[in-house]
Image (tube, rainbow, N blue to C red):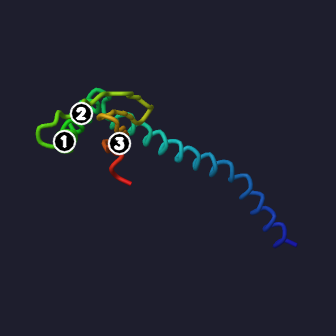
Amino acid sequence: MDDYADIRERRTALRTHRPKIMKRYLTVVGVIFAAIIGLGVWLKPPVAQMEEAVGIALADYARAKTEAGEAAPVVSSSESRDWFVAVSHVAKVGEETFSCAGGFKVTFCFSPDVE
């Protein structure tokens, strides 16, 4: 009977320690999550800088797509949004719409030419 009592005592001890383990686990996950969010906010590209860079790149794109003697289409900025950890920007070159999104110092642009 002593073995049975020892086993029950150990199982009871393990059950009482579970909340501490779970609390530690949740604390570690919370700290990691907060660090990722903090890095995202810190490494997010500024909206004005992104608008300027996209405008320059699209002006070069418009010049490259025009034939000799034609006027390059006008680049117009449609909308810029500053999300919590990312930035998005939509611009038009003539009839084509381009969108860019950036976060963590990485920017992706999507154009109608790429399918």
Precedes in sequence: disc 2 or disc 1? 1
User: At label 3, which amino acid type do we have?
Assistant: Phe
| Residue designated by label 3 | 104
Q: Mark 2: which amino acid?
A: Pro
Q: Mark 2 and 1 residues: CB-CB less than 8 Å, in contact?
A: yes
Q: Residue furthest left?
A: 69
> The residue tagged with tag 3: helix, strand or loop?
loop
Q: Are marks 3 and 1 in contact (CB under 8 Å)?
A: no
Does the residue at mark 2 contact the one at mark 3 (Cβ under 8 Å)?
no
Spot occupied by residue 97 in the image (x, y as percentages of width and height)? 36, 38
Residue that label 2 marks: 73
How far is disc 3 from disc 1 in space, using C-alphas?
Answer: 34 Å
Asked which quadrant contains residue 40, the reply is top left
**Picture quarter with the C terminus:** bottom left
Which-is-in-front pick, marks 3 and 1?
1
The mark lying in front, picked from 2 and 3, is 2
- At label 3, counting other C-alpha atoms closer than 10 Å, the crowd grade (few under 14, some 14-19, many 20 or more) is some
The residue under the point 36% across, 46% down is: 112
Q: Position of residue 28 (x, y in %)?
A: 52, 47
Q: Which residue shows up at 59% across the image and 46% down it?
A: 26
Q: CA distance from mark 2 to mark 1?
A: 8 Å
Q: Nearer the viewer, residue 18 or 6?
A: 18
At which x and y percent is residue 32?
47, 45
Give the labeled residue for mark 1. 66
Residue pictured at 43% horizontal, 41% vertical: 35
Distance CA(mark 2)–CA(mark 3): 32 Å
